[in-house]
Amino acid sequence: MSIVTNSGIERAPEDSGASVGNDTLLEVRDLKKYFPVKSGGVIRRTVAHVQAVDGVSFTLGKGKSLGLVGESGCGKTTTGRLITRLYDPTSGEINFEGHDIGPLTRRQMMPIRSEIQMIFQDPYSSLNPRHTVGTIVGTPLRVHNMVPEKKTLARVQELLEVVGLNPEHYNRYPSEFSGGQRQRIGIARALALQPKLLVADEPVSALDVSIQAQVVNLLRDVQDEFGIAFLFIAHDLAIVRHFCPEVAVMYLGKIVEIGDRETIYEHPHHPYTQALLSAAPDVKQAAIGGRRERIRLEGDVPSPINPPSGCRFRTRCWMAQEICAKQEPPLLQIGKTHKVACHFAGEMHEAPQRPVTTGLLGVDDQGNPSNGTPVAEIHDQPGYADTWFDLKTQSVTSST
Amino acid sequence: MSIDISERPDGMAAPAHPEDPYLVVESLTVKFPTHDGLVQAVTDLSYTVDRGKTLGIVGESGSGKSVSSMAVLGLHDPKHTRLSGSIRVDGAEVIGASEDRMRKIRGNSVAMIFQDALTALHPFYTIGDQISEGYRIHHRVSKAEAKKRAVEMLDRVGIPQAGRRIDDYPHQFSGGMRQRAMIAMALVNDPQLLIADEPTTALDVTVQAQILDLLQDLQREFNSAVIIITHDLGVVAELADTTMVMYGGRAVEYGATREILTHPEMPYSWGLLGSVPDVTGDADARLIPIPGNPPSLLNPPTGCAFHPRCPHVDKVPGDLCRTTLPDLVPGDRGENHLKRCHLANPGEIYAEEVLPEIAPDLIDPTTGELIPELATVDPDEV
């Protein structure tokens, strides 16, 4: 186990710096957002914090897409809104093209706003009912002086055509359009500034099934054509799998598993990911008949005001043991592009009997400090390292 | 806790023929006169649900799936609705029944679980009051007994510390718990027929799985008939015995779930199957959406309502799709599978054109044939 402590886990600074290569568009490092909870009465003291996002790190390459999945209240929407700076982060870095946009003022953010755009969930409330489509799509162009005033209309019509709407309809109001068409208007508005990053927050969950596919295909076309990177936030695992080559699973403000699509969907190592996947109803089940065996998660997501100690999933986890309450599992890289935060990480029915993290944390199997030397600190770094902790051999390996 | 089905203090007659379908809907038509014209919400709809069985109704918003099941409970305002056809609950006609009679049925032998639990629960009354209200209306019991029953029901649907949570208000419950409370409310009188209108749409997947498990357990326990209305084909695949696909206010395909989902014969059903990515299968495959938008029910298309969006219209000779409404009749696969489509050889088109696009992993790459264990349906089980 000493090999582990010496190399690999605690990465050298230049190692993580290397991940901010030319291909990286966005690097989020230890991002946190705590919302204050105020008491009643005249003096509204802050009595607690909702830990909506608590130490999230990931990278997103140019023109790539990352899917964020999780249940409501897991912090995926807050993460998206932090990246678009609709919220101010409590701490952490949001490096967009190498610059931390977290502490920027409103004025300083202005030029960057055109590079990061957002598509909202509800196409009924995200469009101003008193503005025509032309005004809605044209406003970003005017605000950012993208095109001369005279050419605004032409550009708006061009955008409407891109998203598959009739360009002649620019002077109609949102109420004249159906849900799917409204979502297209929202997409046209987001595309108006030719952004490099689009944060799509549940872009299709408010739409009918047959319309969802149209919009997902449109987003794909837009990505292929303009090379836009997507942060795709959704609770529908099938849609995320379809859209994103890389997927992060969030639970109570933390990423519990992140990796490439094949690994996450075929070989999930975190019990929560396994539960999510087994809970999703599957059409193909009809051919086999009846309901398949599924993992039954009991209860609801705990309150983020007072999250459980140690592993946040332990209150609903069927594998939880003593160590899970005492030690928080680090987000450990266990494959080339696969990280998981669980003491008993392993595939379904193959979970290890002993916690895999004891050597790294310097604790015994019950989670009490032991004689082993703990690794000073296991900080989760964005991106993936070249070396990782192999679960089978319990040692650090690399791809070569 | 024990809930005895035979003990029905309301004095409702025991069913005459237990093997008859519990619910029979025959040529139900629902129209709403509006300022813009007559909305033909449901047209000529017929189906049956047996005791202990589940019917899944699938369709887009505006396809008439909720309207038809609300008619079963007599929830449409007669002043603004034109109803015709026949709905028989346990042999008794519901259409045209007096409000007093409806009130005896509603929430008692037939109950409904609504989609959005936050708006369906009254914010001013405690959960316990809302659950026991229905019980006290149909049973001569004291408040205390009704409350005891409410606690029992909350416990049954899996709410922890039911005795303490009974005095909570809806806003103190989480989304999943509210949905459970709604189910408890619907089940408080041991209904013989339960209509669940999108019971899990607003919920997360893990909670959705809990609710679906609960519904299935309760159905087994009480042998009730269940109608589950959803747009999620996955939910239907796992829960329903029979499935009805609705489009533009009409049933377009109706049969055993396994049969409908493995051998759909109507292009709209193909479209629905092609629109949903699943958690297995090829991730890079493009989704095949249904082009266009759902039809207006004010002015439904002539002929087959699906023809403006149907990619197979030109395979039907003449202008049949545009001019003539196809009947809901058995197709190539026998009496148990009804479809409303003019296509002469839907089986071949599905196997040759549609399936390779929507589910290439079901096709054997060497022979180009359907992989048998996924494709064949044992006739005994249908």
Image (spheres, coloured by chain):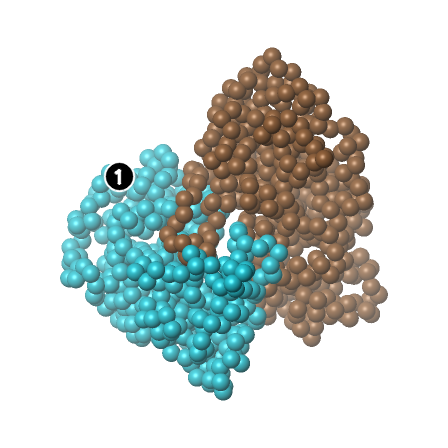
Chain colours: A brown, B cyan
Residue beneath the point at 75% across and 49% down: A62
Near-viewer residue (B166 or A297): A297
Which quarter of the figure is the C terminus of chain B placed in? Answer: bottom left
Question: Position of A346 compared to A120: left or right?
Answer: left
Residue A210 in the image: above or below residue B31: above
- What residue did someone put label 1 on? B148
Given the current orientation, which residue lies at the most extreme front position? B366
Residue A326 position in % (x across, y down): 54, 22
Residue B263 position in % (x across, y down): 42, 65
Residue beneath the point at 34% across and 36% down: B162
Which quadrant of the view contains residue A217?
bottom right
Near-viewer residue (B348 or B51): B348
Residue A206 in the image: above or below residue A23: below
Given the current orientation, which residue lies at the most extreme top position? A371
Q: Secondary structure at mark 1?
A: helix
Residue A163 position in % (x across, y down): 67, 66
Q: Residues within 10 Å of mark 1 (few under 14, many from 20)?
A: some
Which quadrant of the view contains residue B311?
bottom right
Q: Is residue B76 visible?
A: no
Which quarter of the figure is the N terminus of chain B placed in? Answer: top left
Given the current orientation, which residue lies at the most extreme right position? A148
Near-viewer residue (B82 or B125): B82
Residue beneath the point at 67% across and 73% down: A166
